[in-house]
Amino acid sequence: MSADKVFHSRSQGIPSEGVKDQYADGKAARVWKKYIGDSNQRTKNYRDFLTGLLKKHGCVRVLDAACGTGIDSMMLVDEGFKVVSVDASDKMLKHALKARWEKRKDSRYDEWVIEEASWQTLPQDVDGFLPGASFDAVICLGNSFAHLLDEYEDQRTQKMCLKNFAKVLKPGGLLFIDHRNYDAMINSGATPGHSIYYNCKYPVDIKTSVLVVRGKPELVALDYCIDATDDGLITEKSEFRLCYFPHRLHSFTRMLDDAFDNRAQHSIYADFQPLERVDNPAYYIHVMQKALN
Amino acid sequence: MSADKVFHSRSQGIPSEGVKDQYADGKAARVWKKYIGDSNQRTKNYRDFLTGLLKKHGCVRVLDAACGTGIDSMMLVDEGFKVVSVDASDKMLKHALKARWEKRKDSRYDEWVIEEASWQTLPQDVDGFLPGASFDAVICLGNSFAHLLDEYEDQRTQKMCLKNFAKVLKPGGLLFIDHRNYDAMINSGATPGHSIYYNCKYPVDIKTSVLVVRGKPELVALDYCIDATDDGLITEKSEFRLCYFPHRLHSFTRMLDDAFDNRAQHSIYADFQPLERVDNPAYYIHVMQKALN
Amino acid sequence: MSADKVFHSRSQGIPSEGVKDQYADGKAARVWKKYIGDSNQRTKNYRDFLTGLLKKHGCVRVLDAACGTGIDSMMLVDEGFKVVSVDASDKMLKHALKARWEKRKDSRYDEWVIEEASWQTLPQDVDGFLPGASFDAVICLGNSFAHLLDEYEDQRTQKMCLKNFAKVLKPGGLLFIDHRNYDAMINSGATPGHSIYYNCKYPVDIKTSVLVVRGKPELVALDYCIDATDDGLITEKSEFRLCYFPHRLHSFTRMLDDAFDNRAQHSIYADFQPLERVDNPAYYIHVMQKALN
Amino acid sequence: MSADKVFHSRSQGIPSEGVKDQYADGKAARVWKKYIGDSNQRTKNYRDFLTGLLKKHGCVRVLDAACGTGIDSMMLVDEGFKVVSVDASDKMLKHALKARWEKRKDSRYDEWVIEEASWQTLPQDVDGFLPGASFDAVICLGNSFAHLLDEYEDQRTQKMCLKNFAKVLKPGGLLFIDHRNYDAMINSGATPGHSIYYNCKYPVDIKTSVLVVRGKPELVALDYCIDATDDGLITEKSEFRLCYFPHRLHSFTRMLDDAFDNRAQHSIYADFQPLERVDNPAYYIHVMQKALN
C-alpha cells in the first residue's frame, strides 16, 4: 500500500557499497570532463587567484589532493610548479595518466607525479610513493572536500582529513580548500548551474535535494542534467547525482582552524574575492597558512 | 575519498524493491503492536470521536482501509458495526486473522471480513471478495495514508487512492482520513513521541529526517526507538524506520476535495477537536461526507 | 568485457537477505497453491500411506512442521487427527488462517492450531503457544526440508533441526520426512514435473540447476514455469525459483539416524512404496520411530 | 525456515550490476598483479611459444585484447613488436598506464598504445583511437576470453566477440586465444593452482564451483585464496572470486572456426606443446590464421 523509495546518494548503476568511488561508472567521469571543459576554459579569475597566491608565497611543490581528470594540475604544471596529483578514483586518474602521456615530450611534465591516494591515509600514501615528501601548498578545490559525507554524524572523518592536509604541509605552507555556499543552498533549495571554475558551454539543470536530520542539514544531493547532445559523442542528456555534506561557512571555518591547532592564518574569499565584496557568492574559498613553528 | 551513504526509506533488512510492504520483516509488526498497545488502551477521545460520528450519521457498514493488526476494527466490531478490514501487509493481517479466530465464539465477530487489498485497486479488490459491496463509512486513520510516497513527484497515486476511497462509499457516506501535523514537523525538525490514538506505556524516541527536493519537502523518515525492554519478550531496544509523505494541511485539503469532485462536505479536526481549539495539534483528521447524488 | 551474472537462490523480487522466506512475495504462494491443487486432488497413494501409518500406530496429536497453505493439515483434520500446523512463512500461513476461518462452524476444526514457528527453535516455539506439548507424529513432507540450505557447509543447521523434530516427539512417536530423489537429479540434470503428492492439472516445466562446489553438489535450483493461463485470474505464465539442498539418500539416511541417537527404527519408502519395488523414484520418504525409552 | 543463499559470480564488494568490471574493486587487480608476478617471471615456455610464432609469421603490429596490467604487452614491446593494448577494466589499465610512464625514456615504449576497449565493439573502439588500423596478430590469452559469460544461454556475445577479433586482423593474421581445460575441471571438480603463464611464488588454493543448468555446465567460479602474507604490504590472505564460462575443447573449437567462416587454419596446443604430447593439460591454446582472401 506504500510505494518504496530509496534515496541513493549516487547515480543509478553506481554501487553504494564496496567501491568507494562516486565516479566509478566512467560515465560520470566522462560527462564531468565535458562539464568542466578543457584547460583553456578555466576562468581567468580562478587561475589568477590561485597562481597569484602560490607565487606570492614562493610555493614550488604543490599537492593537488583532488586532481580528478588532472585539469587543474596541468594548469599548475604549465605555470612551472612541481605538482603531485592524487585522487581516490581510478576512473578519474585514467584521464590524468593519459593526459600526462600525451605531454611526455614536454620536459615540464616529466616530474609530474600522479598517484592514487585517500585523504584518510594521505601522509602514509604520499610517503609510500614519495618518501619524506612535504609540500609548500596543498589544494583541494572545486567543492571536492564536500564529497566526504558524515558517516558517523560527528564529522570525525572530515576532521581527520583536514588534519592530514595540515600534516603534509611544510611550516608556512598554504592549504587552499573550498566549498559551495551551502548556507544559501539550504535556504533557497536551489543550486546555481554555473561554476566559478569552469566556463561550461552546455546548459545545466541541477536538482537540489537536502536531507535534514533532527533539524540539521546532513546531505545535499545534486542531480546534474547536462544537455551536451550537440556534441555528437554524447547522444543523450546526461544525468548523474553527486552528493555532498553541506558545510556551513561558520562551522567549516571553526573545524578548519581546529585542524591547524588554531595556529594558522585563515583567510576566506567569496568567489575568489574579498568576502565583503560579494553579496551571495557561489563558493567560499579558505586559505590556511600553517604556522612556522 | 568520499564515504557512501544511502538514505533508505525503510529499516535495514527490509527490502527496498519487490516486496511493497514496510512491515515485511515481522519485527516492525511485532514492535508496532507493542507500540500501539492493546484495545483497552485506545484513547477515549479517539473512540468517542469516531463512534460518535459514525452513529450520528447512521453508519453500519464500515471499511477499515488500513486495518493493520486489526485493533481499530475490533473496537468497531465490539460496538456493533459491520466491519470489512483490509491491509496490504500480510504480516499485519496475520495478527488480525489470529485475533478473529480467538473471538470465533463471539457472534459479533462472525461476519468480520479480513482480506488483503491495495488502495490502488480498492474497488476491484473489494469486489473480488464482496461483489457489489459499498460502505457507509471508510476509515483510513493512524497516519496510514502518508505511508504512500510520491513516486512520480506529481502525487498521481495518492490522488487515485483518494478517488478509490470515494468510489466505495455510498452516497452520503463518510471518509475519515488523517495525517500528522507535517507543517509543524517540517518547521521544527521534530516529531512528538506520544500518540493521540494509543496510550503507549514505553518511552519512544523518534529521529526525524526530512528530504527537501527543489525546496519542497518530499519525504519524512521517522526512526522509532522504542525501549520496551521491561517486557521480557523484547530484549533489545527496538528500532525501525517508517517513511511518510509529508502532507501539508493546505494541499492535502485541496487534493481531498478534488477526489470527491469538490462536492463533499469537508470537516477538519485537530486531535479530534474543532480546529480552532488546538494550538499546535499532533494530527489533523479530515471527515468527508460524499454528496448524496 | 565480461558480463555479470548472479545466481540467486530465489525468484527476482524476493529479497536475498533480511526476510528469510522463500515465499515472501505472495506470488509464489499464490502460484504454489495453484500448483498443488485443492485438497480433493491429493493423491490417494499419499493419503492412504500417511493416514494408514498414523492410524496403525495409534497417533492422535500430529505436528505439521511445514504446513504451507494448510492443505495437508486439513486432510488430517478431516480424518480426525488433532493437528498443530506451523510454518515460517507468513504468506503461507495467511492462506491457512483464512481456510480455518471458513471451517469455523465445523467442530473438527475448532482445535486446529496454526502458528508461526521455525525448525531451528521448534521446541521453544511450540512451548510458547502450547506449553508442555509433545506429539505422536511430526510430518515434514513435500520436499520441505530440502529448502533448508547448507549455509556453513557442514550441515549444522540441518542436523539441529532434525534433532528438534526428534525432541518434540513422544517416545515411540513417528517422524515422516521426505526429499526428492536428488541422486537422480544430479545425474540426469532434470527434474520430473509431476508430483506424487498433487494432481497438478497445469503443464509444468522445471529448469534444473545444480551448483557443484569442490566436486560436491551444494544447491539445486528449480525454476518452475507453470502455465496456468487458462485460469482467468493468473494471466501470465508463472515463473518462480525454489532452491534446495540436494540430499543424497545415503547421507540423509545417516544424518537422520544420528538425530535420533541411532536408536530409532528407520524405514525408507520410494514414492510411498517399498524401496525395492520402485526403480527410479521421484521421492524418498523416511519414517522414523523414536525409541520408547 | 530456509536459509537464503545467493551465488554471486564475483567477490563481495564488487557490484553485480552497473559496473561491468570483475576487477572493479582494485583489490583483485592488486592481488592479481601479485599472483601473476613480474615480467621476469613469465615462463620461458610461454615467451618462446608466443614470440616464436609471431616472428615466424613476420608479425609486427600486435593487438593485446586483454592486456590487464600490461605485463604481456611489455614482454612484446621489449621484443620489438608494435603493440596496441586494450582492456575493459580501468583498474587494470591504471597499472599499465603507470608502467608505460616509467618506461617513457625507453624509445621502444614511445609508440605503445594503451586504450580502453570492449570486445563487443572492438573494431569501432580501435577505429576511434587508431583510424583504419588492422593487425598482424591479436592475442587474447591467460584464460581471459572465458571471463565472458553466457548471458543469453546461446553464446551470442561470445560469437560476436570472436568475429570482432577476426575482423581487426589483416588477411593471413594470427589470433592467439586460450582457455583452461574446463573438460577436466568439470569432471574432477578441481582446478590446478599453478599457471603455465606465471611463476607464482605464493601458495594458492582455488575452490572450484560449477553451475550445471539443465545438465549443461554454464558457469565456473574460482575462489582464489592467495597467501601472500609474507609480502609485508598485503597483510591478510587474499580471497577473490573470478567467474568463467566453461568452454569445452570441442565446442570452442567449432565456435572459433565459425567466427572465421571456417576458412582459417586452426592449430591447437596443450600447454604450448603439440596436443598429443600432453596428457591432461591445464590450458588449451588455439592459433587461428585468417585466410588470405
Image (cartoon, coloured by chain):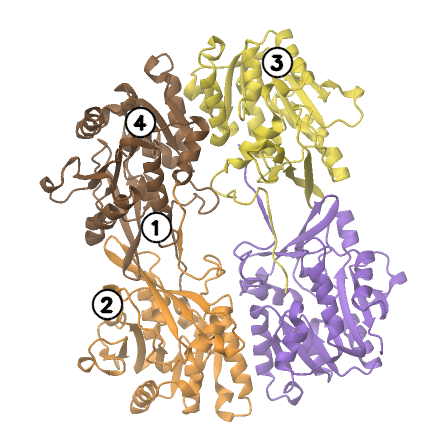
Chain colours: A purple, B yellow, C brown, D orange
Residue at x-position 20% and y-position 30%: C46
The answer to whether residue A37 is seen in the rendering is: no
x%, y% of residue A124? 65, 75
Helix, strand or loop for disc 1: loop
> In the displayed image of the protein, which residue is found farthest to the right?
A276
Q: Which mark is residue C155?
A: 1
Q: Residues within 10 Å of mark 3 (few under 14, many from 20)?
A: some
Amino acid at the residue labelled 2 = Asp
User: Disc 1 or disc 2, which is closer to the eye?
Assistant: 1
Q: Are marks 1 and 2 in contact (CB under 8 Å)?
A: no
**Do tags 1 and 4 sit on the same chain?**
yes
For disc 4, the marked residue is: C62
Q: Determine the chain carrying the residue at label 3.
A: B
How many other residues sit within 10 Å of disc 4, few (<14), some (14-19) or many (≥20)? many
Secondary structure at numbered mark 4: strand
Q: Nearer the viewer, residue A14 or B262?
A: A14
